[in-house]
């Protein structure tokens, strides 16, 4: 049986079945589509279209509604039985709103009123193609779960990860808010994306925003939009992410760093399902699922008065905690192999058994992100087919004992003394490590270091150079006392 040809997300040529009893219209549509790089086939009736669909799959069906014999509405029902993943776009005469409404109720993806312009048709078809491609991604994700115990790029064979996968499957079609917690690098955004792209909202937008990276005033405008003249520089009105994500998912990363004022406005959205643009006077209804994530202990933040309890309980309807990698070592081999394939670019590189044992001994403060960076670095710097333990040096030592010895200030100082590192060099190295810890967020790094951003920008450049010089010779920590 034939299959739809592949397009932008892994598809080579997109395909459409055009159904219309008007020969001139069929010929014109096929010619227009093929000139746009789309493979098109025509059917003169709904019955002929059904026979074609029995033998061949198409990315989209484009059909007239009014046809002699079986009409487009009846055809929709048969498409849903034969090819439930294939979106159907219906063509209807201008002013025939009743037909368009009936088609949408019968399961049509969209409709196009006649007469129409070429660009208008292609815009609607582009959306239908993207919907079909997302459906295919969804099916592949579900197949991956059944075969490998993984969701897309979410990899894990440990009991903890399998519990997370089981929970994700239960909540896919829910509209309830989700709060994902876990250390940096554990894969919180991957979980959020999996929830979205595996569920009922997969055909709608998934919009992530980092609540730490944007100043609070600008963040409010990004989330809620603003009207013209709302503030200096607002020369035009702008829709916010809540409106743009209509029907989809908004991922609020690092929500623990959001200011209290903005937390109250997020709470109102969760309660009322309405937003008001900055400077606006009217509210807009929104249908958006909120998935939030943080690496902070929000209960401690609530006790300290930095996070609203009412918002926490609104977000924490479905809590998902991702354990650190050091607590689920069973996942390290699968993750290492996945990253090897991801960054190996078809070179068939392999990890030696000794290299895998080396990885299993590490402490992984940076979690899966640290593991991925290490694998990517080894692939870039090593030409051999087999990767050995010496190809996988960690910045602070070779094994978990060495890493642990550096976990305390005393361990860090003893290691620096052994290497005869100057005070200036140690200070610059510390700055570089803090910048790496917060993933380049200079505002957060400056807050941790207790210096202003201008000083950090100036010293951060020197720190990066100093860090590189120190990495040329492995920094081996002394054994624990």
Image (cartoon, rainbow, N blue to C red):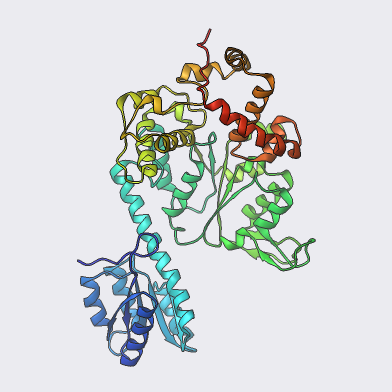
Please state which of residues 106 and 137 is positioned toward the viewer in this rendering: 137
Please state which of residues 349 and 135 is positioned toward the viewer in this rendering: 349
- Rendered position, 100 above or below 135: below
Is residue 295 toward the left or the right of residue 372 in the image?
A: right
Asked whether the viewer can see residue 353, the reply is: yes
Q: Residue at x 74, y 31 (%)?
A: 450
Please state which of residues 360 and 417 is positioned toward the viewer in this rendering: 417
- Rendered position, 98 above or below 419: below
Q: Position of residue 174 (x, y in %)?
A: 47, 52
Q: Quadrant of residue 20?
A: bottom left
- Rendered position, 291 above or below 452: below
- Count of labels in the image: 0
Asked whether the viewer can see residue 297, the reply is: no
Q: Position of residue 201 (x, y in %)?
A: 46, 58
Q: Quadrant of residue 132?
A: bottom left
Q: Residue at x 66, y 50 (%)?
A: 267
Q: Residue furthest toward the top?
A: 481
Q: Position of residue 225 (x, y in %)?
A: 68, 61
Q: Quadrant of residue 234?
A: bottom right
Please state which of residues 466 and 273 is positioned toward the viewer in this rendering: 466
In the picture, which quadrant includes the N terminus? bottom left
Is residue 9 toward the left or the right of residue 277 in the image?
A: left
Q: Position of residue 235 (x, y in %)?
A: 75, 67
């Amino acid at each position: 049986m034939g299959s739809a040809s592949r397009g932008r997300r892994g598809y080579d040529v997109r395909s459409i079945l055009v159904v219309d009893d008007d020969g001139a219209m069929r010929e014109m549509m096929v010619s227009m589509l093929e000139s746009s790089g789309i493979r098109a086939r025509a059917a003169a009736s709904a019955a002929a279209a059904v026979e074609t669909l029995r033998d061949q799959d198409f990315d989209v069906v484009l059909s007239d509604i009014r046809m002699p014999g079986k009409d487009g509405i009846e055809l929709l029902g048969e498409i849903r039985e034969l090819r439930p993943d294939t979106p159907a776009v219906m063509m209807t005469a201008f002013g025939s709103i009743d037909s368009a409404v009936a088609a949408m109720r019968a399961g049509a993806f969209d409709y196009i009123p006649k007469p129409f312009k070429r660009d208008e048709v292609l815009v609607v078809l582009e959306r239908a193609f993207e919907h079909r491609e997302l459906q295919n991604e969804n099916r592949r994700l579900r197949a991956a779960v059944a075969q490998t115990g993984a969701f897309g790029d979410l990899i894990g064979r440990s009991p903890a990860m399998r519990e997370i996968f089981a929970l994700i499957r239960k909540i896919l079609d829910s509209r309830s808010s989700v709060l994902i917690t876990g250390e940096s690098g554990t894969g919180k955004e991957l979980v959020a994306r999996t929830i979205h792209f595996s569920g009922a909202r997969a055909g709608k937008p998934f919009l992530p925003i980092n609540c730490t990276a944007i100043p609070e005033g600008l963040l409010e405008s990004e989330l809620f939009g603003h009207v013209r003249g709302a503030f200096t520089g607002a020369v035009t009105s702008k829709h916010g992410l809540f409106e743009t994500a209509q029907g989809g998912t908004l991922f609020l990363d690092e929500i623990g760093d959001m200011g209290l004022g903005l937390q109250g406005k997020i709470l109102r959205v969760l309660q009322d399902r309405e937003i008001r643009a900055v400077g606006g006077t009217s509210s807009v209804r929104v249908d958006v699922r909120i998935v939030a994530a943080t690496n902070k202990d929000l209960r401690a933040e609530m006790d300290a008065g930095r996070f609203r309890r009412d918002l926490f309980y609104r977000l924490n309807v479905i809590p998902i905690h991702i354990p650190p990698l050091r607590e689920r070592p069973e996942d390290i081999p699968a993750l290492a192999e996945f990253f090897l394939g991801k960054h190996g670019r078809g070179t068939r590189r392999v990890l030696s058994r000794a290299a895998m044992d080396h990885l299993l001994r590490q402490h992984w403060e940076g979690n899966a992100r640290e593991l991925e960076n290490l694998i990517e670095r080894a692939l870039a710097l090593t030409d051999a087919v087999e990767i050995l333990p010496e190809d996988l040096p960690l910045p602070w030592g070779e094994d978990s004992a060495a890493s642990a010895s550096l976990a305390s200030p005393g361990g860090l100082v003893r290691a620096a003394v052994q290497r005869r590192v100057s005070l200036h060099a140690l200070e610059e190295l510390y700055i570089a490590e803090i910048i790496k810890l917060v993933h380049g967020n200079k505002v957060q790094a400056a807050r941790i270091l207790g210096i202003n951003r201008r000083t950090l920008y100036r010293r951060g450049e020197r720190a990066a150079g100093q860090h590189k010089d120190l990495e040329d010779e492995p920094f081996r920590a002394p054994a624990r006392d």
